[in-house]
Image (tube, rainbow, N blue to C red):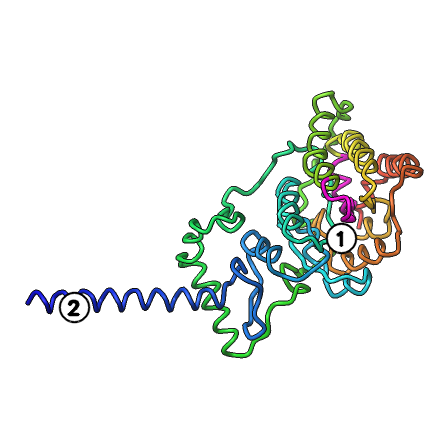
Amino acid sequence: MIPNAKKWFLTCMMALLGTIAVMLFVFWIFDPYFHFHKPFSFVSYRLYDERYINDGISRHFEYDTILTGTSMAQNFKTSETDVLFGVQSVKETFSGAGYRELSENLERALRRNRNLKTVIWTMDANAILRDKDYTDYDAYPTYLYDDNPWNDVSYVFNKNIWYHGVLNNLLMTLTGQPSTTFDEYSSWEKETGYEYVMATYDRWEEKAPETPPLSAADAEMVRENIQQNFVDLVKKYPDTTFYIFYTPYSICWWDFMNQEGMINWYLDAELIATRMLLECPNVKLYNFHDRYDIITNLDNYRDKEHYAAHVNSMILEWMAAGDGLVTKENYMERHEQEKQYYLNYDYEGIFQE
């Protein structure tokens, strides 16, 4: 009985180990977040879950340009970027990200890819007046970001990743479905226009008193935010060109700031950021707050911040042509024009449609 029991035990162990080996091989082949290797040409991949997959894109894809930012960058198309800038680009966006998250992802990408020479990067206006370490997300898959092989068990033996990643890619491959393109990745198509913006816009009925100028503490918070998350990074990689642009929110966002009495407060913070970025020779800073034809036309927006895909396409065209470039020679004139326009705009007219 004992020899048979031992044989049975060894057989079960061999079967178990064999099953695990096959599973690991399948997982390695389909590697849904590109943690172990670059994509195989014979596998179809679904690009999804930005915070899980972007680091793998940085590690293993071939590219010299990154499109990155918050949801304001999700509708960028790498196909358009490649043609306009003459590059090979990937897209890595993080919905709702603060400046630090975007900066840290770029740091990892720049450290791993010496061919990365161009970065196109959103600078959301609503994040300038935040702490340098602000985050709105606390469930990061840090085991994917480091180079520690031992914590990869959280990836390989994760049932959700098996179900939504490995098996999905296997099914796509077997049925001949094409991989998600970077044009499609994280992009969205939603209805835009006045009624859709107003459906989510909770306007203050009465205008608040004008907020006092930035305090010394507020100004220092802005400087620390920009220094840590932009300036330190771009100075560390002087051979990379960073196209950074202020995202053109709709006139309803400016109305919101006006109703809160915060336009001057915001513009003071923007001016600090502008001056700091203009001291970086490898930064091309763009400000599209003077694209009034876009900003005041709510047909371009789904809410007070988010613009439709055709605006992303125009932003790429503007930057490729140098339109909207902020320089040491023109920044004060542009700043004053922006200030006068938004302080004196007829905001009540927005709601008379």
Q: Between 27 and 126, which is closer to the camera in this rendering?
A: 27
Between disc 1 and disc 2, the foreground one is: 2
Q: Earlier in the sequence, mark 1 or mark 2?
A: 2
| Quadrant of the rendering where the N terminus is positioned | bottom left
The answer to whether any part of residue 109 appears in the image is yes
Q: Residue 8's mark? A: 2
| Location of residue 314 with respect to 304 vertically, above or below | below
Q: Between 305 and 61, which is closer to the camera in this rendering?
A: 61
Magenta stretch contains residue 240: yes
| Location of residue 79 with respect to 194 vertically, above or below | below
Q: Quadrant of residue 346?
A: top right
Going by the image, does 288 lie left or right of 201? right
Residue 128 x %, y %? 71, 36
Mark 2 crowd level (few <14, some 14–19, many ≥20, 10 Å Cα): few
What's under tag 1, amino acid-wise?
A: Thr
Q: CA distance from mark 1 to mark 2?
A: 60 Å
The answer to whether any part of residue 194 appears in the image is no
Mark 1 crowd level (few <14, some 14–19, many ≥20, 10 Å Cα): many
Residue 188 x %, y %? 65, 60
Residue 14 x %, y %? 26, 67
Are dots 1 and 2 in contact, CB under 8 Å?
A: no
Residue at the far bottom in the pictured view: 175
Which residue is at a point 61% across and 58% down the rendered structure image? 57
Look at the image and give the residue range highlighted in magenta.
236-258
What's under tag 2, amino acid-wise?
A: Trp
What residue would you read off at disc 1? 118
Which residue is at a point 51% across and 51% down the rendered structure image? 144
Magenta stretch contains residue 34: no
Q: Between 173 and 138, which is closer to the camera in this rendering?
A: 173
Residue 95 x %, y %? 62, 50
Dot 1 lies on which element?
strand
Which residue is at a point 48% across and 63% down the rendered structure image? 165
